[in-house]
């Protein structure tokens, strides 16, 4: 891009091709904090969720996938309707940002299983 300093870099951290076209009328970006040792019960979201771990580590697992540890700088994607089995704060407090694109008139929501 013309005019930008040479020291600016852009790295792709996550490149997701959504399974279907989704009309997005509302996007919410949240900063979420969880105390150390807090488990997030199994749940699903009413839209896709994209996020980045800022502080702490979580045990992360979608149904059908292996468990992973996400640490600061790691990004994640939870497809709409996917069963999130684990998003559990480990030994330290966790802080992350989450982006929730949803349809017009919808609010981001999650249902515990």
Image (cartoon, grey):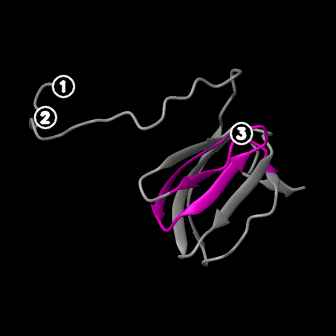
Residue of label 2: 4
Asked if the residue under mark 3 is in contact with the one under mark 1, i.e. CB atoms within 8 Å, the reply is no
Residue most extreme to the front: 66
Q: Distance between the residues labelled 1 and 3?
A: 38 Å
60 falls in the magenta region: yes
Q: In this view, does 67 lie to the left or right of 76?
A: right
Residue 49 is inside the magenta segment:
yes
Foreground of the two, 110 or 60: 60
Quarter in which the C terminus is drawn: bottom right
- Label 3, secondary structure: give it: loop
Q: Does the magenta stretch mainly form a helix, a strand or a loop?
A: strand
Cα distance between the residues tagged 1 and 2: 6 Å
Q: Earlier in the sequence, mark 1 or mark 3?
A: 1
The percent coordinates of residue 54 (x first, y second) are 45, 62
Locate residue 42 relative to residue 67 in the image: left or right.
right
Residue span colored magenta: 44-70
Q: Tell me, yes or no, whether the two marked residues, 1 and 2, touch with CB atoms within 8 Å.
A: yes
Q: Which label is found at residue 24?
A: none
Left/right of residue 37 with respect to residue 3 in the rendered view: right
Q: Name the residue under label 3.
A: 65
Q: Position of residue 63 (x, y in %)?
A: 79, 42
Residue at (60%, 77%) from the top-left corner? 36
Residue that label 1 marks: 1
């Amino acid at each position: 891009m013309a005019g930008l300093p040479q020291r600016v870099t852009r790295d792709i951290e996550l490149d997701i091709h959504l399974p279907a076209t989704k009309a997005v009328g509302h996007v919410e970006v949240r900063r979420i904090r969880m105390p150390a040792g807090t488990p997030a019960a199994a749940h699903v979201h009413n839209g896709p969720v994209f996020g980045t771990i800022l502080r702490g580590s979580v045990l992360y697992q979608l149904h059908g996938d292996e468990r992973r540890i996400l640490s600061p700088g790691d990004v994640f994607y939870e497809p709409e309707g996917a069963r999130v089995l684990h998003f559990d704060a480990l030994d330290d407090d966790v802080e992350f940002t989450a982006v929730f694109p949803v349809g017009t008139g919808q609010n981001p929501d999650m249902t515990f299983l």
